Amino acid sequence: MISFILRRVVYTVPIMLGVSLVCFALVHISPGDPLVSILPPDASVELQEQMMAIYGFDRSYPEQFMRWLGLAVQGDLGNSIATGRPVATEVFNAVGNTLILAVTATIIGFTLGGLFGFVAGYFRDSWIDKLATAISVIGVSVPHYWLGMVMVIIFSVELRWLPATGAGPGGSSQWVWDWEHMQYLILPAITMSVIPMGIVARTVRALVADILQQEFVAGLRAKGLLDRGVLAHVIKNAAPTALAVMGLQLGYLLGGSILIETVFSWPGTGFLLGQAIFQRDLPLLQGTILVLAMFFVILNLLVDVAQTALDPRLQRG
Amino acid sequence: MAVTADSIAQLATVEKSRGYWRSVGARFLRDKVAVCAGLVAAGLILMAIFAPWIAPADPLDGSMIKRLSPIGTEGYPLGADELGRDMLSRLIHGARLSLFMGVVPVLIAFAIGGAIGIAAGYLGGWVNTITMRVLDVLYAFPSVLLAIAISGALGAGILNGLLSLTVVFIPPIARVAESVTTSVRKLEYIEAAQASGASSLRIVRDHVLGNVLGPIFVYATSLISVSMILAAGLSFLGLGVSPPNAEWGLMLNTLRNAIYVQPWLAALPGVMIFLTSISFNMLSDGLRSAMDVKQ
């Protein structure tokens, strides 16, 4: 097991390097001078050169990359061009809010999707299976940002039950788990949960149907075990894969929260990205994407290790 | 001798494949859901092609006094948008850019990713290892994040949007192509072709492609639905298509501020995205089971 974990960690290092290279390249594939947005249009040549030197744009690419990577490892992601504040601080504040949203959405989506998928797989080809399949197809096909708008229209504009946007009276920095704040979380979290729900339902349905067809289940039944007992075995067998899917989905939600955060003005990383795009604030864009991608890589690693720990058969593969 | 054997084998494949496609067609037609989805998708494509002839009004021509007219206003069956442009005409015209932005990246990625994957799978060895490791890096990004990162850096614009979506879809397609090709390469008839002295290019063209393109294509069609949602999502964020063009994601974006005035009007473009995405999704599911591709 330890050697497996080590191998997996070693394998992750080049991926992380590659990911940072892609993030580094983002600034350089963007057209135009990266300093255009901070310099006045009539800036003198000296001022331009001075700024180039401050931001390090006057050196060779490999040199710039090494310098940028060295600073990034120490937690320095540069300063936002628009606000002048350190990117790391801005991202750090926003990540917490995105986590609140994404974790809540994953829990809702996993519970409902797992339930639908389980029932559908257990009663295969029944009407309940067809219903669950339809729900999962809708879940993966619906443009979630539009679903968010529809939720706002129904529950905020028409019914006036829940607030439409924002994260409550504490603003972006002070989240509290009380009703005053949580009512702001309900709509975005439910909207976001629809994505993993469809995928989890699909996976669990296939898993359960597959496990029920295996010989050991027939064996258990022949032994005289009641349905409830069989159920426990099915859950035990489906759990590692289902948990892995859940972990990956959390990663996708962290990275893909931008559209939903934009709809609900939720002050997380997605909102930050939207701002960075709107103001062409490249260091902010780069830093946020780097942090989110690293989160995703590490989460993948953890999921892999956890899955192998739960199901040692995978180690051989 | 080798030539004759080869041509006989080829004939046999052609005969077999014709029968195969016929049975795929028959199986597909029996699947009512897939046929319905196919009809809706075909309808949407026809709507995009013939938009200027179907649409009752000019999609760019607005009237200030008609701004945000509700659904059912006379002369504006689906209302008017925030600049007083006919919603129905904009939705019809929107099919053009929306479908283009959704489908084209998948097609390009199918060509590029397919080629990369087949080459890596057939050549194997260190070429395979290096190619797949490089793709793993792009795979390490959630797709939404990668699309937004690239188009955010490149800036708004149709071409930038297409480019970023293509980059997003190359790794998954290449991965599927690689795994399918690797499994085909291990089959005995490939070894036989190699033994008979056929060149790599010839083997790939005559013996590998026919067996791997189907599964890769089915996989690619399953990405169209994701691509539609992502492409419209980019425009929704202000990347991708820019105003005053009619595109569903962009329309959602500009109508978003109107949800307190005309809520259901503002939601209309999303219905179109949803309809397109779900019909392509079910079409692809039907295609997969008709071709009996296991993934």
Image (cartoon, grey):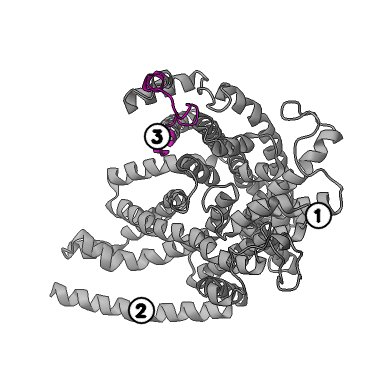
Q: With B119 as the anchor, is A283 left or right in this view?
A: right
Q: Look at label 1 and name its amino acid.
A: Ile
Residue A126 x %, y %: 73, 69
The chain to which mark 1 is attached is A
Which residue does the image show at 57% across and 23% down from the upper left? A88
Q: Which residue is mark 1?
A: A154
Q: CA distance from mark 1 to mark 3?
A: 43 Å
Q: Secondary structure at mark 3?
A: helix
The chain to which mark 2 is attached is B
Q: Work out whether B164 lies above or below B5.
A: above
The answer to which of A87 and A116 lies nearer the viewer is A87
Residue A211: tell me if it is visible: no
Residue A175: tell me if it is visible: yes
Which residue does the image show at 43% across and 64% down from the upper left? B217
Q: Which residue is mark 2?
A: B16
Q: Work out whether B292 lies above or below B180.
A: below
Q: CA distance from mark 1 to mark 2?
A: 55 Å
Magenta range is: A25-50
Q: Which residue is mark 3?
A: A28
Which residue does the image show at 42% across and 30% down from the upper left? A17
- The reply to whether the C-beta atoms of the residues labelled 3 and 2 are less than 8 Å apart is no
Q: Which image quadrant is residue A135 in?
A: bottom right
Residue A280 x %, y %: 52, 36
